Image: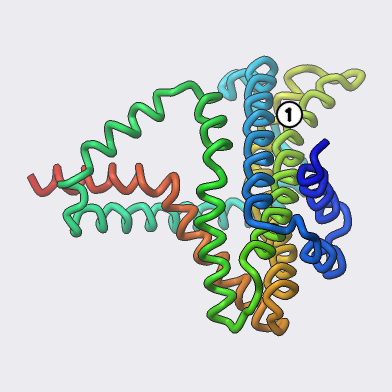
C-alpha cells in the first residue's frame, strides 16, 4: 500500500478515535501533510460516502414501504417532548433557507444574470436532476475536491485575517482529516434509522409494521437532532486546525471557527442548492414582471 495512502488513512483514524490537540500537532508535523494529499483524502472520502449513500438508498428501497401505508403510531411521551422544540427549530431553519433562496433569486434577477444565463442554467439543472440518483451521488463524490478547495481558501483567509501564520498545505491536510471524520460519523447516523427499524421488526413478538413505524419516527425526529450534534462536533474538531496550524490564541481560533461556519452556511445554501432554487425564483420574478 502506498505510503501516502497509509498516511491519509492513519490521519483519518487518529482524528476519528483520538481527537485532540496532540493528534493534530502530530499530523501537521508529517511530511505527507500537503495539499495534494488533502485533496486525495477528500476525493477518497467523497467516493466512499457516495457509494455508501447508494447502498443505503438501495437497502431502504428494498425494505421500507410507503409512509402512507404505515399505521398510525403514537411514539413514547418522552420522545414527543424532545421533538417539539426540534420541530420548532426545524421550522425556523426552513424559513432561513427559504429567505436565502429568495435572496439568491433577487440577485439573479436584479443583476441581469438571469437574462444572460438563466435559461441555459435551468436547462442544465433539468438534465442533472433527470439523472438517476446513484449517478448524482457519484458525481457529487467525484467533484467534492473542487468544493473542498473553495472552502479551504475561504477558511484559510479567515485565519489569516485573524492573525494566522500557518502553511496552507498543512492546514488543508488537517481540515481534510476533520472532513473525513465528519463523513464517517454522518454515514453511521444515516444508517441508524434503517438499522433500528430492521432490528425492531426482527424482535420476538414484533412485526414489520412496528419496525416501519420506528424507522419513519427516527427519520422524522433524527434528521435535525443529528445535524445539530454533527454541527457541534464540527465546531469542536475544526477549532484544532485553526489553533494548531495557524497559531491563533484560543479566542481568535473560536472566532475563526464561528466565522468560518457562517461563511460555510452561505456557500452551502448556494452550492449546490441555492443556484437552482435561486434561478427558479428569478424565473418566477421574470414571469411576474411580464
Q: Is residue 9 above or below residue 210?
A: below
Q: Nearer the viewer, residue 257 or 287?
A: 257
What residue sits 71% from the left and 24% below the top?
212
Location of residue 103 by image quarter: bottom left
What residue sits 43% from the left and 45% below the top?
273
Location of residue 6 by image quarter: top right
Instruction: List x then y, in percent, for residue 15.
Output: 81, 56
Name the side, left or right, on which 207 lies relative to 286.
Answer: right
What residue sits 71% from the left and 79% below the top?
247
Q: Nearer the viewer, residue 27 or 83?
A: 27
Q: Is residue 58 visible?
A: yes
Name the side, left or right, on which 134 lies relative to 283.
Answer: right
Most extreme residue toward the left is 290
Q: Is residue 68 above or below residue 32?
A: above
Mark 1 nearby-residue class (10 Å; few <14, some 14–19, many ≥20):
many
Q: Is residue 278 above or below residue 205?
A: below
Residue position for label 1: 194
Instruction: List x then y, in percent, for residue 135.
Output: 52, 25
| SS label for mark 1 | helix
Instruction: List x then y, in percent, for residue 119.
Output: 21, 37
Q: Is residue 84 visible?
A: no
Amino acid at each position: 500500500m502506498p505510503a501516502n495512502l497509509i498516511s491519509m488513512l492513519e490521519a483519518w483514524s487518529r482524528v476519528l478515535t483520538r481527537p485532540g490537540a496532540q493528534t493534530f500537532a502530530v499530523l501537521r508535523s508529517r511530511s505527507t501533510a500537503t495539499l495534494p494529499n488533502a485533496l486525495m483524502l477528500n476525493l477518497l472520502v467523497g467516493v466512499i460516502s457516495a457509494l455508501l449513500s447508494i447502498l443505503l438508498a438501495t437497502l431502504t428501497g428494498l425494505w421500507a414501504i410507503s409512509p402512507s401505508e404505515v399505521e398510525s403510531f403514537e411514539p413514547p411521551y418522552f420522545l414527543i417532548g424532545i421533538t417539539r422544540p426540534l420541530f420548532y427549530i426545524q421550522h425556523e431553519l426552513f424559513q432561513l433557507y427559504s429567505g436565502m433562496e429568495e435572496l439568491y433569486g433577487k440577485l439573479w434577477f436584479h443583476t441581469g444574470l438571469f437574462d444572460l444565463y438563466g435559461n441555459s442554467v435551468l436547462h442544465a439543472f433539468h438534465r442533472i436532476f433527470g439523472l438517476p440518483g446513484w449517478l448524482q451521488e457519484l458525481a457529487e463524490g467525484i467533484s467534492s475536491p473542487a468544493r473542498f478547495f473553495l472552502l479551504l481558501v475561504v477558511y484559510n483567509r479567515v485565519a489569516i485575517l485573524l492573525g494566522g501564520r500557518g502553511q496552507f498545505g498543512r492546514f488543508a491536510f488537517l481540515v481534510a482529516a476533520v472532513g473525513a471524520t465528519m463523513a464517517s460519523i454522518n454515514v453511521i447516523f444515516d444508517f441508524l434509522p434503517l438499522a433500528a427499524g430492521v432490528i425492531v421488526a426482527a424482535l420476538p413478538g414484533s412485526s414489520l409494521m412496528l419496525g416501519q413505524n420506528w424507522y419513519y419516527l427516527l427519520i422524522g425526529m433524527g434528521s435535525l437532532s443529528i445535524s445539530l450534534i454533527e454541527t457541534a462536533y464540527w465546531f469542536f474538531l475544526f477549532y484544532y486546525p485553526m489553533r494548531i496550524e495557524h497559531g491563533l490564541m484560543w479566542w481568535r481560533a473560536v472566532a475563526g471557527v464561528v466565522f468560518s461556519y457562517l461563511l460555510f452556511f452561505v456557500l452551502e445554501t448556494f452550492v449546490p442548492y441555492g443556484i437552482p432554487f435561486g434561478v427558479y425564483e428569478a424565473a418566477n420574478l421574470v414571469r411576474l414582471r411580464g
